[in-house]
Every structure is written in structure tokens, then in C-alpha cells.
Image (cartoon, rainbow, N blue to C red):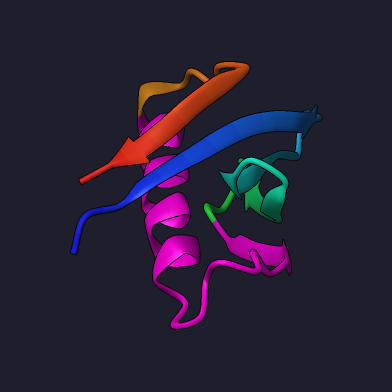
Amino acid sequence: MAFYIEMDKVAETEEYVEYTFGRGLEIGVIRLGKKDGTIHVLKECPLDMEGEWSQRAAMKLIRLMRSGDFPERTQWAS
């Protein structure tokens, strides 16, 4: 199954970064703790029936954390 998930940064502090994830108006919100790498889904994406979208958004955030760059917009495509 192919995935295309749009991600937009909505908040960033020294402690965490938050992104919306989904497509169009069907979005959830996910938070990454910058210090310990913890991931919290703050709002489920309505398109994410099996939890696969939030898993992929989390993987993208971990990759961003490793690179040290949190762009305003990013995506997951597979």
C-alpha cells in the first residue's frame, strides 16, 4: 500500500515540536519530544484507521530529529 502524508509544523519550543499530519482537512496532530525522542499523537487523523499514518509520521519526526532540522513543511511518501 502506498502512502502520501502531508506534514506541517504548527508549534516548536526548546522541548518539543508539533506537526499536523494527513491530507487536506483530514489531519491529526503529533508531538516529538526533542530531548528524549518521545512521540505522542495529540489528535488522531480521521484517515488513519489502522494507526499506519501516525506510525509513518512518527518515523519522519525521528529522522528530522536525527538531522536536527524541523522544516515548516515536510511529507512522508512510500
Q: Is residue 30 above or below residue 53?
A: above
Quarter of the picture holding the N terminus: bottom left
In the image, taking residue 52 as reference, residue 61 lies left or right, namely right
Is 25 inside the magenta-drawn segment? no
Q: Locate residue 29, reporting x and y percent.
A: 71, 53
The answer to whether residue 69 is above or below residue 48 is above
Q: Which residue is drawn at the image coordinates 37% and 52% (left, top)?
A: 59
Q: Position of residue 50 (x, y in %)?
A: 44, 83
Q: Position of residue 43 (x, y in %)?
A: 76, 65
Q: Report the residue at 58% width, 61% height from top.
A: 39
Above or below, 4 against 7 in this view is below
Picture quadrant of residue 20: top right
Front residue of 14/50: it is: 50
Question: In the image, is 57 to the left or to the right of 44?
Answer: left
Could you say where residue 3 lies in the image, as x and y percent from the top left? 30, 52
Q: Is residue 59 left or right of residue 42?
A: left
User: Residue 60 occupies which quadrant of the picture?
Assistant: top left
Q: Of residues 37 and 41, which is closer to you in this image?
A: 41
Residue at position x 68%, y 69% in the image: 44
12 left or right of 7 in image: right
**Residue 45 or residue 29, whichever sits in front:** 45
The magenta region covers 38-66
